[in-house]
Image: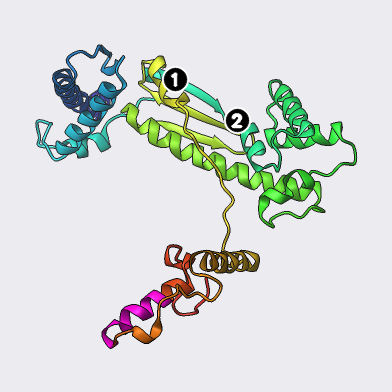
């Protein structure tokens, strides 16, 4: 019985060592690639100050840091089929089998980001400087500091408390391009702002995901809580808080514009009127430029037809409406 237990214990140890060996080989290979990437970066940026802290390189020169990250990514990608284990396992296969260490095992950085939605509300409003709007936003910001409730809900609650019986629709209707009417209920306005906020948070989430990929940590964990408007980021193995803060807090200038579509008859009419006005301004009310048609030669008829077409629709010569060729509709 004792011999059987010893055999099972020995097998368990061998299996564990085999599984752990992938992590050792991967770390060894990645360390070698990091050293090569660092050497190449020093040659490309001799004046840059590069700090290698536990395998994570940071620099006072943003271009040098970006160059290092790109070189390391290329080196790792180009060596994915390189055999790194004693028994001929490739880097890519070994990477898939390595032991993933979380924050509790190898440490790292845990960040909670609060998505600021006050700018979104101002961007959706007809008049961002409206006193009632600004007062409600300020109150929502104050309450948000002590609450986990969604900022949009806090804003609507603050506005209703400060303006009993007043409707939110007049603050947003004109800027929504027929998505809201002036008589819309506060709940309809709330639903509209929520949908826009969710879209903005998803966009922010995607931007952060792309930025986090540059850290080079294994299996970063990023999650979005739309109800609370927060994004949680776990970077196992990250050791440079300043670099993380710089990447995550760098500002992306996102602007939102309401656009027109040719399905809007008012828009079509406006374009047609603009075309007629431009035609009158350029060629006169009859669309002619004063050329004597009796002197036209036969070989100039093709060019003359093209010229007349251009004069008839000068605006649409430079603005091409996107029309479905099968239905003839925009």
Which of disc 1 and disc 2 is earlier in sequence?
2
Q: Is residue 272 above or below residue 21?
A: below
Res. 157 image quadrant: top right
Q: Is residue 75 magenta?
A: no
Task: Identify the residue under disc 2.
Answer: 116
Q: Residue at x 49, y 65 (%)?
A: 282
* Mark 1 element type: helix
Would residue 144 appear left or right of 198 to someone viewing this image? Answer: right
- Say how the picture is coloured: rainbow
Q: Is residue 8 above or below residue 156?
A: above
Magenta span of residues: 298-308
Q: Whole-percent x and y of residue 158?
A: 80, 32
* Mark 2 element type: loop
Would residue 262 appear left or right of 233 to someone viewing this image? Answer: right
Q: Whole-percent x and y of residue 321?
A: 48, 67
Which mark is on residue 245?
1
Which mark is on residue 101?
none
Residue 217 visible in the shown view: no
Front position in the image: 279 or 72: 279
Q: Residues within 10 Å of mark 1 (few under 14, many from 20)?
A: few
Q: Is residue 90 above or below residue 140?
A: below
């Amino acid at each position: 019985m004792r011999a059987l237990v010893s055999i099972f214990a020995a097998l368990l140890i061998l299996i564990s060592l085999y599984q752990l060996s992938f992590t050792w080989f991967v770390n060894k290979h990645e360390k070698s690639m990091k050293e090569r990437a660092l050497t190449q970066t020093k040659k490309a940026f001799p004046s840059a100050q590069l700090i290698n802290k536990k395998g994570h390189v940071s620099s006072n020169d943003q271009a040098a840091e970006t160059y290092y990250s790109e070189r390391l990514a290329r080196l790792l990608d180009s060596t994915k089929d390189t055999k790194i284990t004693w028994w001929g396992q490739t880097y890519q296969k070994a990477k898939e089998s390595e032991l993933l260490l979380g924050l509790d095992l190898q440490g790292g950085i845990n960040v909670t980001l609060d998505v600021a939605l006050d700018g979104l509300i101002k961007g959706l409003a007809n008049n961002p400087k409206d006193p009632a709007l600004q007062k409600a936003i300020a109150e929502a910001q104050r309450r948000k500091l002590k609450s986990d409730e969604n900022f949009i809900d806090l804003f609507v609650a603050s506005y209703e408390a400060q303006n009993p019986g007043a409707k939110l629709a007049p603050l947003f209707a004109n800027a929504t391009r027929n998505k809201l009417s002036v008589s819309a209920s506060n709940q309809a306005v709330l639903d509209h702002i929520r949908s826009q906020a969710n879209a903005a948070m998803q966009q922010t989430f995607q931007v952060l995901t792309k930025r986090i990929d540059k850290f080079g940590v294994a299996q970063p964990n990023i999650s979005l809580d739309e109800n609370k408007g927060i994004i949680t980021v776990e970077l196992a193995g990250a050791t440079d808080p300043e670099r993380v803060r710089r990447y995550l807090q760098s500002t992306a200038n996102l602007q939102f514009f309401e656009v027109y579509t040719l399905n809007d008859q008012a828009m079509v009419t406006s374009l047609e009127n603009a075309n007629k006005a431009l035609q009158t301004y350029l060629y006169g009310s009859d669309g002619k430029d004063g050329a004597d048609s009796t002197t036209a030669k036969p070989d100039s008829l093709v060019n003359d037809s093209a010229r007349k077409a251009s004069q008839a629709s000068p605006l649409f010569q430079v603005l091409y409406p996107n029309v479905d060729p099968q239905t003839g509709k925009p």
